[in-house]
Image (cartoon, coloured by chain):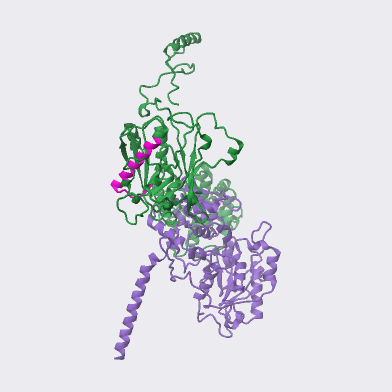
Chain colours: A purple, B green
Amino acid sequence: MMAGRVLVAIAVLAAAAALFVAAEAQQAPAQQGHQTERISGSAGDVLDDDPVGRLKVFIYDLPGKYNKKLLKKDPRCLNHMFAAEIFMHRFLLSSAVRTTNPEEADWFYTPVYPTCDLTPSGLPLPFKSPRMMRSAIELIATKWPYWNRSEGADHFFVTPHDFGACFHYQEEKAIGRGILPLLQRATLVQTFGQKNHVCLKEGSITIPPFAPPQKMQNHLIPGETPRSIFVYFRGLFYDTGNDPEGGYYARGARASVWENFKNNPLFDISTDHPPTYYEDMQRSVFCLCPLGWAPWSPRLVEAVVFGCIPVIIADDIVLPFADAIPWEEIGVFVPEEDVPRLDSILTSIPTEDILRKQRLLANPSMKQAMLFPQPAQAGDAFHQILNGLARKLPHGEDVFLKPGQVRLNWTAGPVGDLKPW
Amino acid sequence: MMKQLLPQSQLRRSAAASAARSSVSGVEGAGGPDGVGAGAGAGGRTASSSTFWFLLHALCCLISLFLGFRFSRLLFFLLFSSSALYAATSNNKSAVLRAITTTTTTTTTTTTTTNTFTLSFAAAGNPPPSNPDNLTAAALEEAAGSTQSHVVVGRHGIRIRPWPHPDPVEVMRAHRIMERVQEEQRRWYGVREPRQVLVVTPTYSRAFQALHLTGLLHSLRNVPYPLTWIVVEAGGVTNATASMLARSSLTFVHVPFPEKMPLEWADRHATENRMRLHALRVIRERKMDGVVVFADDSNVHSMELFDEVQKVQWMAAVSVGILAHTGTAEQPRLTEEDKKNMPLPVQGPACNSSGHLAGWHTFNTLPFSGKTATVVGEAAPVLPKGLEWAGFVMNSRMLWKEAEGKPDWVKDLDAVGENGEEIENPLTLLNDASYVEPLGNCGKKVLLWWLRVEARADSKFPQGWVIEPPLEVVVPAKRTPWPETTMDVSSEMLDAKQEQEDRQLPRTTTASCWGYVF
């Protein structure tokens, strides 16, 4: 009798759940109206999740030489493309997920700005970064017990550099160095993402590159301006300074785009950077996002913000928040070997798919997730990072080491890295 | 060309001759600036092997001659590059092959920009050398059979297809995609449900008709909404008008009007009003649905007008710029005071501070008093009489006998003009004029311009603007040697001939063709 009642209860619950799911599905197309469509990624509808209450982050109090003093010495660090490491620190300092009690923290954050070492022309140098990072980790390992109990497995670091925690801008050298040995167990929050690559660790969170949100806001044009450019791209095709013979830069993909499509009226591509760059993107249907020296580029962020369908030409790239955003439904992926057929590929996409992609791009939560606004707003990239960290909780079995167990090798890596900073 | 072919063939030969590894070692052993050959030749050699090494050395010298530093760098790369550079050591072989291959490719690319020659070292046999579509990556992947990432750091070939020109079919497809995207954009940001536009135009056949109708026709073709053009022609349907309408590729209704257009402007205004009313009756009879816009053929309309009129509920007014064209050099004598107080040449709705219709702003005709044209084609300013119809738009349902929600402040169309009274302006169609909606940001934006320019009523113009019989010569072409004259005709003879012809011309010249139209 009890079993029968339990069975009936389960059946009723199942029916209710089925009805609810059906209602949701029915509601979904009509809900956002004619303009936008809901983004449902592989992890469900997670862009709107609120991380507050789902995790707690403790921020180590490092001396100014790791962060404040560097910024004071060169405030240009706030404007270059790795500025996310600074803005993340500022966001966390005033965020609701911050806790001052390390005992209840789920994640530990180390505020160090490894690339705030700029050349006179403003390019970040990575040469001192490994030493700086190592020095910071040594400090937290000696001053607090939390590093040693997990050897960094419940710590996260923001490394938005060309090749992440490999700390070099040249791919071969970066691969040669590999990820800094001390960060082997930590979670890395980085812009670089490429499958089966040394510099992308399992469990990393990929984030979009920093693009100034205010600048993009200032260049918005009315939505009814017809999209009359088919394919748009502005940037280098050959890097004659660093790769005079060609074929090395972008694995020859950008050069291939130029050689095949420079005479094609549908392709508005050139190296000339006009002042109407953002406006032109809003008048285009497709925006090319080919790889450069690294697979990621701020063009992806710009394309999403301006509603231009991104055409991603970078084999095996891992895009930002890939577990929350269904990039295959939003963008077009073209393998590098298919670049000569790019026009055929793009013109043979069914019109309905193109309209659907535009509706997905028009979704404001999609645009918000790509940006780092100051001050932070709900649903922006900062919150998506926290969501990503929250999804990794609760920590697994092997996060906390048993007493006496040591996993990291503190003397691994090039000799130059071991020098104190 | 030689430069490309030689290294290719040499490399192919050297590679195909032995397995990849031994070819590498052979190359390294024999030549290169590193002098590794010394090591290879350390052991005791037979005569044949020494000649072999000598030949190989010579070969490599030749290669270095052509490739220069690139060759030495290639060897350096092969010798001293660590396997850490590649995703898996098993890929070394394929990667090395790729390296050789891609170096060649790049050379080709820099010298000639049309084709890339890629060599693929497949497991068996020698595939054709210059097959641009046969890309290395795919072939090598099959050969190596790796499941690792095929993305490799290093120099890659620049893939160029053999015919890098656009395919017209694809270009058309792209344009269709863009049209669809733009249609969707209009649906999102523009008007929710675009209504049909019913354009009412009174016209008649005269010299300036082609000028006016062509302009109006082009404006209407650019209107992004479904449109029906109701053309009422005074004096019945003529071929000239009909052919113009047929060529316009617009949906039109050509309505004949029995009266002929009178010569005096005052009468013409009245006749036009009657023609418009006739058109409204046609709309009512056929129960045409949409927004009625009065577009006189000599007026000029902006595209924003058609976007704005979509907002009309029942009846609306827009601002019209009145261009009183003087036609002569004589300007009306204005005093300084007049000039200061000169009101704007605009007819339109005037609003109060809360945005509701408060009254009308009409064109001030005082400065022109006494000097306006009375006859069509007279060189004097033509002024509007009262409120022009062009400044009003209405919902066609207002004209129907029965329409849902038709307001009571609208007179029934049959009741209008039945007693023979003149219809001055559209406000006579209403019982209460205060319900008219002001459009165009409460009349702030001038959306169309009113102008009356006509030629004299008796102006001659070619029927249908087709010239029959062909034009006669008025002014002969300058003296040029005609193609028929042979070389041995001397120049004096030519001059004499020319003078003869000149003397003959004045007799054959007829009255000049100017004075046709003015």
Q: Give the percent coordinates (x, y) of residue A203.
A: 51, 72
Q: Is residue A193 above or below residue B465?
A: below
Q: Give the percent coordinates (x, y) of residue B108.
A: 51, 46
Q: Give the percent coordinates (x, y) of residue B253.
A: 32, 41
Near-viewer residue (A383 or A129): A383
Q: Quadrant of residue A376?
A: bottom right
Q: Is residue B100 above or below residue B257?
A: below
B270 in the magenta segment: yes
Q: Is residue B254 above or below residue B306?
A: above
Query: Disc count in the image?
Result: 0
Which region is colored magenta? B268-292
B169 in the magenta segment: no
Residue at 54% over, 32% down: B332
Residue B22 visible, this orientation: no
Q: Quadrant of the C terminus of chain B?
A: top left
Going by the image, does A42 lie left or right of A11? right
Residue B368 visible, this orientation: yes
Helix, strand or loop for the magenta stretch, by majority: helix
Q: Is residue B327 above or below residue A122?
A: above
Near-viewer residue (B277 or B151): B277
Q: Give the percent coordinates (x, y) of residue A207.
A: 53, 66
Near-viewer residue (A119 or A347): A347
